[in-house]
Image (spheres, grey):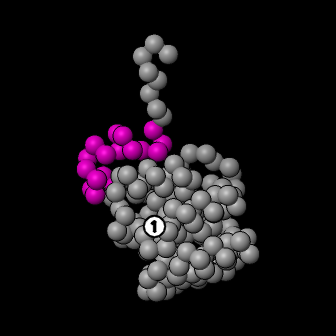
Amino acid sequence: MHDLAMLEGKKVLLVDDEPDILDMLSEELEMCELYRARDFESAKQIMEKERFDCVVLDIMGVQGYELLQIATSFKIPAVMLTAHALSPENFIRSIRSGAHCYVPKDKIIDICFFVWDAIRAHKQQEKEPSQWFEKLKSFFKKKFGRNWTEAHDPNRKPEKPPGS
């Protein structure tokens, strides 16, 4: 079980080009110390000046992958948020690029859980995806197809090639 009290006072940067999404995120994460940015340059400047416990990045519209690169260089756990870029390819790219998790905007109501999980996993120096993927597995299966997790489950250990 997760303890959302852990989010109290945590410093979180929210980046999205849609003001209504920023407002929804702000409402859900009201217990945190929030910073908001609507574009790449603003987000980059804020990340260079402040230290954050977590960043929530939109993929489209704000150069999310470039911001993810900056966040990972500062060792800030990142939650990727998307609507238009919801695909297995973007999922894999996000995780391989260092995002803690990849969250569809349909699940914004659960953003506290995803931010909590990113901060917790970062503190414990977990290298593998944790609870967030289990929470979204059925959603991804519905969106991407039944066999999707066979090839894309970040918790799945790669098989050793024959003869190794």
In this view of the protein, can residue 49 be seen by the observer?
yes
| Res 159 → quadrant | top left
At x 45%, y 67%, the residue is 59
Residue labelled with disc 1: 59
Amino acid type for the residue under numbered disc 1: Ile
Give the image location of residue 127, x and y in percent: 61, 45
Give the image location of residue 98, x and y in percent: 57, 53
In this view of the protein, can residue 28 be seen by the observer?
no
* Residue lying at the far top of the rendered structure: 163
Q: Check if residue 155 falls in the magenta segment.
A: yes
Image vertical order of residue 91 relative to residue 9, above or below: above
Give the image location of residue 139, x and y in percent: 33, 58
| Res 90 → quadrant | bottom left
| Res 136 → quadrant | bottom left
At x 51%, y 62%, the residue is 65
Range of magenta residues: 140-156
At x 60%, y 69%, the residue is 55
At x 36%, y 40%, the residue is 151
- Image mark count: 1
From the viewer's side, name the closer residue of 156 and 95: 95
Quick check: 11 left or right of 145? Answer: right
From the viewer's side, name the closer residue of 69 and 76: 69
Give the image location of residue 88, x and y in percent: 35, 52
Label 1 Cα crowd, 10 Å radius (few <14 / some 14-19 / many 20+) = many
Image vertical order of residue 164 relative to residue 119, above or below: above
Q: Quadrant of the N terminus?
A: bottom right
